[in-house]
């Protein structure tokens, strides 16, 4: 294992790699969401099988309203936790914050 001394150059390389991974993950997630929006449950079931090895059908999946509300609250709490916020988000304009929140709903 190689230990690097943290300096501005090392930090910049690390953050650039992280940024590119986040962009790639966002691109994949966007593709999945677009497919599910377009093709509904059939797409959801295909992705669950492909990614998780689950064989879901309408008869095998049920999410109560309470579970859905709890999941939405949890996703917001995780997304907007201070430790998960990108640098500078606290100074972002209100319209930027609204756009981020709109994507979660």
Image (cartoon, rainbow, N blue to C red):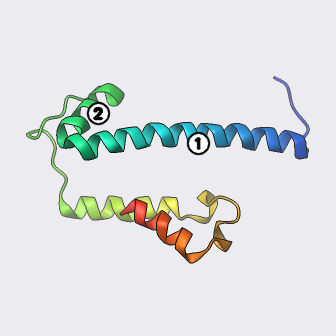
Q: Which residue lies under the disc numbered 2? A: 48
| Image coordinates for residue 52, horizontal then vertical, percent | 33, 30
State whether residue 74 appears in this view. Answer: no
Relative height, residue 45 to residue 75 (above, below): above
The C terminus lies in quadrant: bottom left
- The Cα–Cα distance between marks 1 and 2, rounded to whole angstroms, is 21 Å
User: Residue at the bottom extreme?
Assistant: 94
Q: How many numbered circles are shown?
A: 2
Residue drawn at (51%, 59%) of the image: 79
Q: Nearer the viewer, residue 14 or 97?
A: 97
Comes first in the chain, label 1 or label 2: 1
Residue drawn at (61%, 65%) of the image: 82
Q: Which residue lies under the disc numbered 1? A: 22
User: Residue at the top extreme?
Assistant: 1
| Image coordinates for residue 74, horizontal then vertical, percent | 41, 61
**Residue 35 - label:** none
State whether residue 98 appears in this view. Answer: yes
| Image coordinates for residue 36, horizontal then vertical, percent | 27, 42
Residue 93, quarter of picture: bottom right
Residue 46, quarter of picture: top left
Residue drawn at (32%, 63%) of the image: 70
Mark 2, secondary structure of its residue:
helix
| Image coordinates for residue 75, horizontal then vertical, percent | 42, 58
Relative height, residue 90 to residue 86 (above, below): below
Q: Is residue 59 left or right of residue 5?
A: left
């Amino acid at each position: 294992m190689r230990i690097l001394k943290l300096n501005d150059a090392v930090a910049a390389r690390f953050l650039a790699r992280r940024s590119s991974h986040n962009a790639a993950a966002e691109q994949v997630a966007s593709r999945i969401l677009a497919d599910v929006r377009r093709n509904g449950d059939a797409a959801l079931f295909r992705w669950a099988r492909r990614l998780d090895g689950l064989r879901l059908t309408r008869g095998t999946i049920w999410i109560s309203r309470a579970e859905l509300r709890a999941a939405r609250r949890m996703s917001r709490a995780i997304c907007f936790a201070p430790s998960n916020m990108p640098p500078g988000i606290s100074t972002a304009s209100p319209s930027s914050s609204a756009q981020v929140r709109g994507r979660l709903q």
